[in-house]
């Protein structure tokens, strides 16, 4: 059995600074969070950037340049840059950091869907910045656009960089979209498929939902893929346990969930990594090192990135 790859999504674009005092916002905070997650056992750190004053998602290459060299200098972890950015951004905006910095891994959403964040307004009522409330409210009328043209654009722009993708699949149809691009030869195996559970508008969090994703991916991709699971919010650790028990890799981090347990905010990304590592080792599984993850995913190596 292959060792389990832990990905840690450090800050993301879903949660806002008012929701948790532990969410990394400034470049310095993002560096410390990424390094801490790697030291705790994450082989891959998945990175977004934010405006250091307002905490608003910032997909400019300049924003990423403020922390990428420090993270590379202080850890051997695989760096995975978002091309999801924010669902309110265009694909042209979202892919810029991956085009410029040529990371070993970049995320890529492989389908459009309703991306509903507004239920968070029932739990969070006080905000530091007005954009935060509007960010959640606007998702009542939000389609996270990832059309076939958008996906083709991202694949083409990163083709020469030898960047592999964390292929984020929020529903069953997204697996078929990936199969379409694979059949056309626009993306090559091994595919790193990240199944996302628990976002309103995507697939749910029942164990049968997880099993359905796994069965469908097995049927479509056979031995040509590595599977990983991401549970949103309070479902994070339960989904990780289910997915790992089915032979999958796992993703945790404050992008996906602010919590460590019921009513208990995670004080760091590292705390979530330690928690999921304890679950994995309790199942008799071994955690992959960064170099083992590079071998499993057939990555180009940290010496071939541009930061």
Image (tube, rainbow, N blue to C red):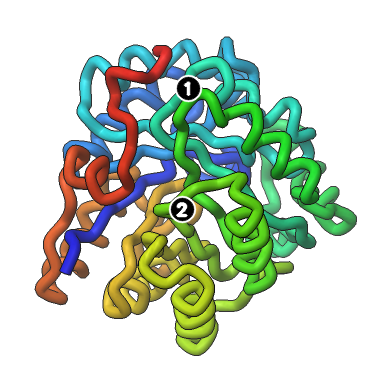
Residue lying at 64% horizontally and 27% vertically, measured from the top left? 157
Residue 165 in percent (x, y) is at 49, 43
Residue 281 seen in this snapshot: yes
Residue lying at 26% horizontally and 50% vertically, measured from the top left? 296
Query: Considering only vertical position in the picture, is 34 above or below 183?
Result: above
Residue 43 in percent (x, y) is at 25, 43
Q: Residues within 10 Å of mark 1 (few under 14, many from 20)?
A: many
Q: Quadrant of residue 199?
A: bottom right
Q: Work out which quarter of the rendered image holds the N terminus and state it.
A: bottom left
Answer with left or right where residue 102 lies relative to residue 70.
right
Q: Nearer the viewer, residue 50 or 280?
A: 280
Residue lying at 46% horizontally and 86% vertically, measured from the top left? 207
Residue 58 seen in this snapshot: no
Q: Are marks 1 and 2 in contact (CB under 8 Å)?
A: no
Q: Nearer the viewer, residue 64 or 288?
A: 288
Residue 149 in percent (x, y) is at 80, 43
Task: Classify mark 1: helix, strand or loop.
Answer: loop
Q: Quadrant of residue 17?
A: top right
Q: Which mark is residue 258?
A: 2
Q: Residue furthest bottom?
A: 208
Q: CA distance from mark 1 to mark 2?
A: 29 Å
Q: Nearer the viewer, residue 49 or 24?
A: 49
Query: Considering only vertical position in the picture, is 207 above or below 83?
Result: below
**Chain-order first, disc 1 or disc 2:** 1
Residue lying at 40% horizontally and 12% vertically, measured from the top left? 307
Q: Quadrant of residue 277?
A: bottom left
Q: Which residue is mark 1?
A: 102
Residue 64 in percent (x, y) is at 51, 18
Q: Which mark is residue 13?
A: none
Q: Residues within 10 Å of mark 2 (few under 14, many from 20)?
A: many
Task: Classify mark 2: helix, strand or loop.
Answer: loop
């Amino acid at each position: 059995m292959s060792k389990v790859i832990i990905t840690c999504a450090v800050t993301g674009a879903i949660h806002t600074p008012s929701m948790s005092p532990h969410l990394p916002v400034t470049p310095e905070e993002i560096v410390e969070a990424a390094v801490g997650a790697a030291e705790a056992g994450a082989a891959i750190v998945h990175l977004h950037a934010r405006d250091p004053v307002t905490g608003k998602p910032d997909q400019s290459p300049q924003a990423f340049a403020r922390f990428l060299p420090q993270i590379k200098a202080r850890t051997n972890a695989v760096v995975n840059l978002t091309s999801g950015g924010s669902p309110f951004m265009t694909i042209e905006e979202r892919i810029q950091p991956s085009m410029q910095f040529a990371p070993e891994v970049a995320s890529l959403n492989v389908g459009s869907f309703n991306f509903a964040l507004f239920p968070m307004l029932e739990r969070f009522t006080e905000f530091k910045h007005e954009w935060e409330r509007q960010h959640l409210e606007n998702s009542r009328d939000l389609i996270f656009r990832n059309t076939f043209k958008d996906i083709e654009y991202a694949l083409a722009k990163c083709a020469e960089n030898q960047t592999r993708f964390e292929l984020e699949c929020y529903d069953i149809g997204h697996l078929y979209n990936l199969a379409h691009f694979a059949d056309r030869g626009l993306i090559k195996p091994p595919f790193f498929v990240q199944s996302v559970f628990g976002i309103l508008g995507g697939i749910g969090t029942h164990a049968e939902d997880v099993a359905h994703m796994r069965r469908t991916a097995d049927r479509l991709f056979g031995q040509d893929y590595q599977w990983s699971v991401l549970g949103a919010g309070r479902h994070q650790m339960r989904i990780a346990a289910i997915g790992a028990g089915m032979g999958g890799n796992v993703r945790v981090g404050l992008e996906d969930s602010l919590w460590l347990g019921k009513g208990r905010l995670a004080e760091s990304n590292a705390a979530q990594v330690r928690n999921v590592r304890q679950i994995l080792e309790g199942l008799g599984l071994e955690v992959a090192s960064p170099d083992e993850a590079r071998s499993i995913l057939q990555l180009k190596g940290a010496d071939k990135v541009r930061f």
